[in-house]
């Protein structure tokens, strides 16, 4: 804690310095005039000021009050305690009006009077700093700041969140699994005037219909078998907060009808109860499926869709914002104790992956690499070993080869036999004639490889010497 002592008397500053030294973990600066105090505040940025009302021997001097006015005019938040010889109540009242937190008369100055005041202010400052830190953490974790990425798609999502956050309108959040739909819901809650109220989320696909209904609306004792007490539902517990209905597409049809009536009337009835309760919470919904298609199939109510879809926020899959991968990597690695680095070829490797699980899959990959990578710098070869090839990438490569073969002239004969012969030949050649190793490479057992090889050899002119390759002696030719 940095304390600025402002007094025109050197002896008074020394007394205060001696008392403050008993606190421990404090840095003490001094100023003897109004001008010096203003300069110190701008350069030293103290956490607390101890100020005398009079900063000179002039009877009309009120430099301490002028300092408080100057601090107030600059919009600075530096708390002050008046340590003064003035006993004029109107001056002390003026100091308090200008923002002073407390005062001690010099005639009564002693550690027992001063130190509890300073210690109390220090504790408040520590608490205020902790509140700021927690709020910043909440914003990073659940606010718009948690939606990492500078791509145009994510900027649009953030702008839309900020525009509709303080509204009472229902919002339908759409996106593939792992794109961050709950993050959007929590950001809408935390940016709204409801942020001090509860945020409740229920997964509509996780439980049978009756249990979901009880979870949302609650139930009274005896409402069904096993209901031995009254249980409040999410709508009641949320109060004036926010309720997220996740995986809304999986809600049973009968419950969809009840939800529609609740949203229209803003009232709900717990299971088994005859009394209705008001719905004060804002309702958000999220889904990873095409609700329009579900409506065409008759599996989702059209009227409920339009009631929920007042505003729609569509989250792009990671494959459509690959430019955000570097920023996401930086964010995820910063959260982990070990700071691994990804080489340029590793970033290229990650940028070409399909990411079916989107941002959630990328986060999990970073955690796996952080735990298992041998070196602090991870390259593409390490990712191949730790993460594995992207199945979609292998499928794309195979598709390219197949298209090339299908484009060959028809006089090559059976193209299926051509492919099989080429695969077996190159496998045996790569394994230096070791058919057991070649069979493992191809993905069949040794006998199956021999049978296929023999069939292809019998149906064609075979190798140049007319014989299949000998056992494991060397590569054969077809």
Image (cartoon, helix red, strand yellow):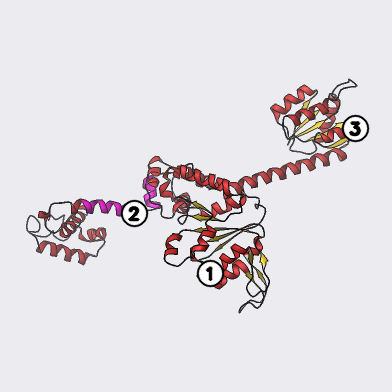
The residue beneath circle 1 is: 207
Structural distance between the alpha carbons of marks 2 and 3: 79 Å
Q: Are marks 1 and 2 in contact (CB under 8 Å)?
A: no
Q: Is residue 229 left or right of residue 347?
A: right
Find residue 64 and report its image quarter. Answer: top right
The residue beneath circle 2 is: 392
Q: Is residue 60 left or right of residue 477?
A: right
Q: Where residue 298 appears, x then y in whole percent?
A: 44, 67
Q: Give the numbered dot on residue 90.
A: 3
SS at mark 1? loop
Q: Is residue 74 left or right of residue 323?
A: right
Q: Residue at x 51, y 63 (%)?
A: 303
* Boundaries of the magenta span: 379-403
Whether residue 166 is situated above or below residue 289 in the rendered picture: above
Residue 376 visible in this rendered orientation of the protein:
no
SS at mark 3? helix
Chief SS of the magenta region: helix
């Amino acid at each position: 804690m940095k304390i600025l002592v402002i007094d025109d008397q050197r002896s008074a500053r020394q007394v205060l310095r001696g008392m403050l030294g008993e606190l421990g973990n404090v840095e003490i600066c001094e100023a003897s005039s109004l001008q010096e105090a203003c300069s110190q505040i701008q350069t030293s940025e103290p956490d607390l000021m101890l100020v005398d009302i009079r900063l000179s021997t002039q009877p009309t001097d009120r430099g301490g009050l002028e300092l408080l006015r100057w601090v107030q005019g600059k919009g600075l938040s530096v708390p002050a305690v008046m340590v003064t010889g003035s006993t004029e109540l109107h001056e002390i009242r003026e100091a308090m009006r200008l923002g002073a937190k407390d005062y001690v008369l010099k005639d009564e100055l002693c550690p027992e009077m001063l130190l509890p005041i300073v210690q109390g202010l220090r504790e408040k400052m520590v608490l205020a700093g902790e509140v700021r830190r927690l709020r910043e953490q909440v914003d990073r974790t659940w606010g718009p700041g948690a939606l990492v990425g500078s791509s145009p798609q994510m900027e649009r999502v953030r702008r839309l969140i900020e525009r509709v956050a303080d509204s009472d309108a229902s919002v339908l959040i759409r996106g593939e699994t792992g794109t961050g739909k709950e993050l959007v819901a929590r950001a809408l809650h935390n940016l709204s005037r409801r942020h001090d109220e509860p945020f409740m989320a229920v997964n509509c696909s996780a439980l049978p219909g009756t249990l979901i209904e009880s979870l949302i609306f609650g139930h009274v004792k005896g409402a069904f078998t096993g209901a031995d007490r009254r249980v409040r539902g999410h709508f009641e517990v949320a109060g004036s907060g926010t309720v997220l209905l996740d995986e809304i597409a999986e809600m049973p049809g009968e419950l969809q009808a009840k939800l529609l009536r609740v949203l229209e009337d803003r009232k709900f009835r717990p299971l088994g109860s005859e009394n209705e309760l008001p719905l004060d919470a804002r309702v958000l919904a999220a889904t990873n499926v095409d609700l329009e298609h579900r409506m065409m199939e008759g599996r989702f109510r059209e009227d409920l869709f339009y009631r929920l879809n007042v505003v729609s926020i569509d989250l792009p899959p990671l494959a459509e914002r690959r430019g955000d991968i570097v920023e996401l990597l930086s964010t995820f690695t910063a959260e982990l104790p070990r700071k691994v680095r990804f080489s340029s070829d590793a970033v290229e490797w990650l940028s070409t992956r399909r990411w079916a699980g989107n941002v959630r899959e990328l986060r999990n990959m970073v955690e796996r690499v952080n735990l298992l990578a041998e070196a602090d710098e991870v390259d593409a070869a390490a990712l191949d070993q730790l993460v594995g090839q992207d199945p979609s990438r292998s499928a794309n490569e195979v598709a390219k080869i197949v298209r090339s073969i299908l484009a060959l002239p028809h006089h090559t004969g059976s193209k299926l036999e051509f492919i099989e012969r080429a695969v077996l030949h190159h496998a045996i050649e790569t394994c230096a004639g070791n058919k057991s190793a070649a069979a493992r490479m191809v993905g069949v057992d040794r006998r199956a490889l021999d049978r296929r090889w023999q069939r292809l050899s019998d149906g064609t002119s075979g190798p140049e010497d007319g014989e299949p390759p000998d056992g494991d002696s060397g590569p054969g030719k077809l």
